[in-house]
Amino acid sequence: MKWTTVFDFDSKQKFVSYEIVHQTTYSYEHKKRSSVMTVCMQPKATSWQYLDHYQLATTPESRIDIDVDPFGNTRHFFDIHRPHNKLTVTSNARVRSQFNEVNETAELDDWDSLANLHTKLEFWDFLLPTDLTRTKSDLDRWTDHQGGIDKSSPWSFLKSLEHRLSEVIRYRPGATSIDSTVDDLLRHHEGVCQDISQLMIAIARSKGIPARYVSGYLYVAPNATRRLVDNATHAWVECYLPSKGWCTFDPTNPQGAPETRVTVAYGRDYRDVPPIRGITFGEGEAVMDVSVMVFRL
């Protein structure tokens, strides 16, 4: 079975359009009796991002159900209860993105403007530490030691932190795992977008700034001269400032154009929004192969 959704959009607006094909294949040593999976790959429909079309398909075929989680993310669920030695999940999306940069009104926020945010229920999940963002380190001392971080206002702090993290943390695939913590990153100073984003989240929350993890996709032009990250799944950060709302920061790739990012889901950290997770029933090992392609239309 395929799950297909078609969305309307305002054709008078100017957009950057992308097609995203995200395919995950599990190959099993021995046939599995059953598989139960949750998928979080459908891009969000927002005021600046329009989802024209979305389709999710599985091989073997399955019935696919849909729901929305507490963070407003779309999730698809399926189960297969017959023997299979391979499982393929293919997500296909067409998105139009129109992104407005944060303007200078963000500078109006001062540190006192954040004082009461902890009393509002909507921000609690994004102010409290999680297992991946909790740290034994003194983050104030760590940021001071890095230098170059402007603490004159929350906006200046976040923008300078975004750029400084991209300089002091080396982007290196394979240096960490999906279970790596902020303390792991601080010890080795190398990781991937997931790790660097979670470090920025931990620092922002330590300052009383609500911060959430964003999962999605990144388009990198084929002729890009500086490839900080691959053309694939990506993660970044959104922080809440009272005068502006949720503002985007990408500490892995701060020079990237905002419209090159496609938002899929919000969470407290990576564990809230992995692209796919689930369980299988049967003996033997599994090998996972992931292919992500982002095309500009």
Image: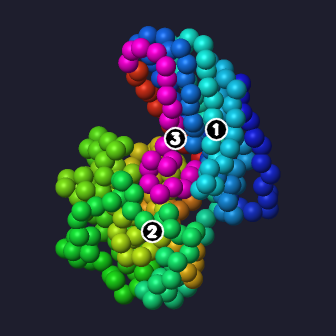
Residue 76 circle label? 1
Is 241 in the magenta? no
Q: Is residue 139 above or below residue 58?
A: below
Residue drawn 62% across and 50% down? 69
Where does the magenta region start and end? 263-285
Q: Position of residue 87 (x, y in %)?
A: 54, 21
**Amino acid residing under circle 1:** His
Does the CB distance between marks 2 and 1 fall below 8 Å?
no
Of mark 2 and mark 1, the one earlier in the sequence is 1
Colouring chosen for the image of the structure? rainbow
Q: Disc 2 versus disc 1: distance between alpha carbons?
A: 28 Å
For label 2, the residue is 127
Q: Residues within 10 Å of mark 3 (few under 14, many from 20)?
A: many
Q: Residues within 10 Å of mark 2 (few under 14, many from 20)?
A: many
Q: Position of residue 220 (x, y in %)?
A: 47, 49
Residue drawn 73% across and 47% down? 52
Q: Disc 1 versus disc 3: distance between alpha carbons?
A: 10 Å
Q: For the residue labelled by badge 3, is the local secondary structure a helix, a strand or a loop?
A: loop
Of marks 3 and 2, the one in the foreground: 2
**Amino acid residing under circle 2:** Leu
For label 3, the residue is 275
Quadrant occupied by the N terminus = top right
**Amino acid residing under circle 3:** Pro
